[in-house]
Amino acid sequence: MKILDVEPKKCDGSRLCLKTLDKLREFSSDSGQSHTRGQVLPFQGSQSAGLEKCASIAERTLETNSTLHSEETGSQISQKEEPSFDLNQFSASHKSYEKPQNTSNTNNNKRTKTVYTPLELQVIELKKQYKDAILCVECGYKYRFFGEDAEIAAKELNIFCHLDHNFMTASIPTFRLFVHVRRLVAKGYKVGVVKQTETAALKAVGENKSSLFSRKLTALYTKSTLIGEDVNPLLKLDDPADVEEITSDVTDNYLLCICENEENSRNKKKGDAVIGIVAIQPTTGEVVYDSFQDSASRLELESRVLRLQPVELLLPSNLSDQSERLLKSLTSVSLQDDRIRIERMKNVHFEYSHAFQLITDFYAREALDITGSQKLSVILNLAKPVICSLAAIITYLKEFNLEKILNNPSNFKQLSSEAEYMKINATTLKNLEILQNQTDLKTKGSLFWVLDHTKTCFGRRKLKKWVTQPLMKSSEINARLDAVSEILQSESSVFGQIQNHLSKMPDVERGLCSIYHKKCSTQEFFLIVSTLSRVETEIQALVPAIRSHVKAPLLQNALLEIPELLHPMKNYLKILNEEAAKTGDKTQLFKDLTNFPTIRKRKEEIQDVLSQIQLHLQEIRRLIKNASANYVTVSGQEFLIEFKNSIISSVPSDWVKVSSTKAVSRFHTPFITENYRHLNQLREQLVLDCSAEWLIFLDCFSEHYHSMAKAVDHLATVDCIFSLAKIAKQGDYCRPIVQDKRREIIIKNGRHPVIDVLLGEQDQYVPNSTNLSGGGEKVMIITGPNMGGKSSYIKQVALITVMAQIGSYVPAEESAVGIVDGIFTRMGAADNIYKGRSTFMEELTDTAEIIRKATSRSLVILDELGRGTSTHDGIAIAHATLEYFIRDVESLTLFVTHYPSVCELEKIYPRNVGNYHMAFLVNEEESEQKGPEEEENPEFITFLYQITRGVAARSYGLNVAKLADVPEEILKLAARKSKELEGLVNMKRKRLKSFAEIWNINDSHELQKWKRIYETEDD
């Protein structure tokens, strides 16, 4: 089916016939509350794109619509009262095509009742139930959209829509459903798939054989719930463009629910709140939760949202202004098609009393045994805002039939734990570019991009968690480092074989979850089970080699557990018929029907009918006196008896003619007519029976879900270790020494891990060393020219620390890191319009948060604090803040500044503070060149990018202006002005120095001496 790319020519409303205009007026006259869709970017105003395309052909469409769809040409139903459902979303866009006022009298002679086809009435009833979803309605060999849904589909999918009967309509072929559903979901819509629940043969013998095919909604999809047979990315794709679109899926599909409780916060007036969150990936089964006290800036909430990167938010209808502003700023950052989808629920779903009852009912189903009561106890011990969020998520997922994944609370994990993971807040995630770069917000250029060499999708998801959650226990860190070291040093072929097996694996984590939800196809089930069975066989064969050659406990334990956990796979694989599974034929899916009596019985009934029809062939041969006569099948019609047209007169009169050509005619006998109808009914019933047995079979398989998921988690861990090992194999990477009790960051010739990769081999990154110690020099004050590499250096120190605590080798010759409990940064200059903050306010808000949260075991990075205000205020804030960190917090601190007076702190705290600058050279020849009028020129600077002891007296900002191609005349004027200001400042300093000296003179001889020196200097 080709999609029409050319839009029909637009035309004026005057070309519409009166009949069409009157019909459109009737539809646009419906009044009611407009419905707001639960999507990211609700469409403003009416959607008229579809009508603009097709206004010129509306009359022709109305005249010929009876030939398009036989189902709609049934008896027209006259409605005395219009349906209670608000039809504005179907017909609102027709208003712009009303007839001018001079035709209003004509309308009085027309009928005032709207006539709907049976299909339209059925769609209206479905829209009443699913008002916020775009419905794809199965109609024979295609799926159709109606009303506003059709107009949205036409716009987003670039397909054609037209007016048919009462509503706009558009359609897509059935075999392209999964592609189009995914495209609509990616745009932020909720999409429902409505399928026919009856088959033709069964309907013919049913009570409603003369009525419409019954239909019901079989699946709903949003960004976070994109799981099911209709959107299965594992199906075979013939179009390369589709392959790229489907496989470029985002790594995570978190649904994040947020609930806040301002009543329990310590300072309600300031906007503080206690916030509870629950995040779930229905596609992988992961559930995380957290509860925390947050300030009005909502930095804690922001850090968790940025870490999880959810695709969908579930929120109460009313949130605090502070939270609303934050979420607006976060959802507006991404590109239009990648924005976070927001779903709102009534506040009652987030009330504790309602949540408590729902949670109790949900987990009380199993509360009769000890396990069930333990589950309920685990849930009720969570914080109240978390329970409220969990209840809302359960309610929401029930709409999608995905709530089953929440049955096992033992799989719930707390997102942030101060005892387990380093604290990395939202500001640090952004400033250090840990998950995405700050230029285009893509993964390339981030720390995660550097470390990610995983072979599997589930390995990549696990590595992302590792990167955002550096460990706090040296034993766990060293376990990972031991595993990486063993892969580097081992000469065994075991690791190569395991890595080769991993590279061939599909996303089995999502596949298992699809099976668990009973939303998988037979193709997907067979692919997942056969993959896991193969992995079990291959690793089982390597067990002796693993025991003898793999020494690292982390690797050995994971690899040895996998075969045992995956052992049941073979049994399920034996049950299935491979060919039927790959083609999706559920009637031939099971090899042995001993455990499937319903299917066996139905197949026996079918075989009985087939036997009778075959016996009937002997009677036909005797009747027509042709011993060689046989049944033929033509165009799907079976058991036909074929006669040449020359002898058609000898055919019995009660035989039914089915088809014919110029040469032959084909007939059914009365016996075959009756039994063939019965056979088709049995065949369709067999399909239904097999589908029911298939769901029971999946239920049985789901009993092994948690052991399968554990095996996949082990595979993900192994994949992550291989990824870190590949990084370690790069040149000049070393194993860091990580110790619990020491407060130190010692790096010899370290390099920025991201810039080092981006530069490649042709440009070498200049290495720098760092020596911070809690018992000695714990503060570095860094000065130097603009563009000299100060920010890159401090980011380098922070990223090497993160890598070390992830368990990765680091880009340095040597490295020793004491456990850091958190990294806090204040870098860059930008306002935040959504939060209503100026640049300086943002700067100080971040600083205040660091002052509250940093400890003596933290790494604090402050880049040019105080630059957003006047010089005196800026210096005062910078000086006071740094002194507070030196004296009170005692954290390891990197402080970048352009204020020379801040460097005086080294004299006050010589043991704890060191002054450094980024080395540079001033090109004196270039700088001393004067014009004809001895005019000033900016100095020409050569950057050395080397950290060096001492203070840089100047920042050489004019050099950066020159590099930025500021016009020459402005540069010369700025250089002259800079010289004047510098002379003025030097003169003031000289006078202050002279005043201080004369103030301390006590006799006339020294006074005369001072006077002579002062006069000489003035001359």
Image: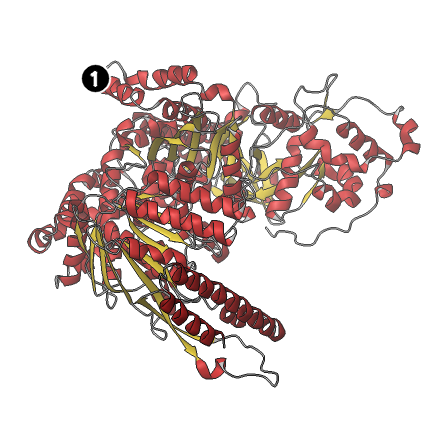
- Left/right of residue 793 with respect to residue 53 in the rendered view: left
- Left/right of residue 640 with respect to residue 918 in the rendered view: right
- The 10 Å Cα crowd at callout 1, few under 14, some 14 to 19, many 20 or more, is few
Residue in view at x 9 percent, y 52 percent: 551
How is the rendered protein coloured?
Answer: secondary structure
Q: Residue 237: in sight, yes or no?
A: no
Q: Nearer the viewer, residue 594 or 340?
A: 340
Q: Residue 878, position in %: x, y? A: 41, 50
245 vs 606: above or below: below
Q: Nearer the viewer, residue 124 or 423?
A: 423
- Left/right of residue 575 with respect to residue 398 in the rendered view: left
How many circles with numbers are drawn on the protein?
1
Q: Which residue lies furthest to the left in this view?
A: 548
Q: Image quadrant of residue 601?
A: top left
Q: Residue 1011, position in %: x, y? A: 43, 70
Q: Residue 378: in sight, yes or no?
A: yes
Badge 1 element: helix
Q: Residue 806, position in %: x, y? A: 25, 50
Q: Which residue is the site of mark 1?
A: 370
Q: Residue furthest front?
A: 1004
Q: Residue 63, position in %: x, y? A: 78, 38
- Left/right of residue 985 with respect to residue 15 in the rendered view: left
